[in-house]
Amino acid sequence: MLLWQWPLLWLAVGAVAAVIEGLTVQLVSIWFALSAGVTALVTLMFRPAFSTQLLIFSILGLVLLISTRSFVRKKMQVRKERTNADRAIGETGIVTKTVGDAYIAGRVLVNGLDWAAKTQDGASLEPGAHVIVKAIQGVTLLVEKAP
């Protein structure tokens, strides 16, 4: 291979790594794409032997990967945001319309919102009773009498 072709080879390696990163978005290949770019620049300026080029590429890629992976992973971590419905679980509410068994849905006021509600154990709860939301089934709260 001619001397002027080595930097092009490293740029091609970097482009392939960048495409792989774009397809996978795992924050692994991007460091090797950067490493290939730096290796191409060093090769263009200093014309080192191929073994030295390979060493620069490998060491730089691994150092970038290891040193930034935990930091980037923390920044990229997406916290699961609870929806309004999820927030109702564990909350207390007040029965506004008699809540019965699995076939009779009553109404419960939880955090200012009116919900259809059923009891888990089939007990009947009269208006004014305090309840705790145990689960959500579709758009219906499953409740039990508060202690």
Image (tube, rainbow, N blue to C red):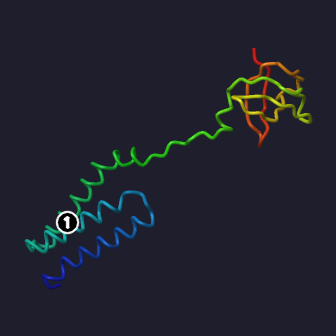
Q: Where is residue 90 in the image (x, y as percent from the top left)?
A: 67, 27
Q: Which residue is drawn at 29% across and 63% down?
A: 32
Q: Which residue is drawn at 68% across and 32% down?
A: 88
Image check: 71 left or right of 44? Answer: right
Residue 33, compared with residue 120, is above or below; it is below
* Occupied quadrant, residue 80: top right
Name the image quarter holding the N terminus: bottom left
Q: Which of 58 and 42 is in front in this view?
A: 42
Residue 14, compared with residue 62, is above or below; it is below
Q: Which of 79 and 108 is in front in this view?
A: 108
Q: Position of residue 46 (x, y in %)?
A: 7, 71
Q: Where is residue 141 in the image (x, y as percent from the top left)?
A: 77, 34
Image check: 143 left or right of 59? Answer: right
Q: Residue at x 82, y 35 (%)?
A: 116
Q: Which residue lies furthest to the right in this view?
A: 103
* Occupied quadrant, residue 109: top right
What is the secondary structure assignment of the residue under circle 1?
Answer: helix
As shown in the figure, which amino acid type bears the numbered disc 1? Val
Provide the residue designation for mark 1.
38
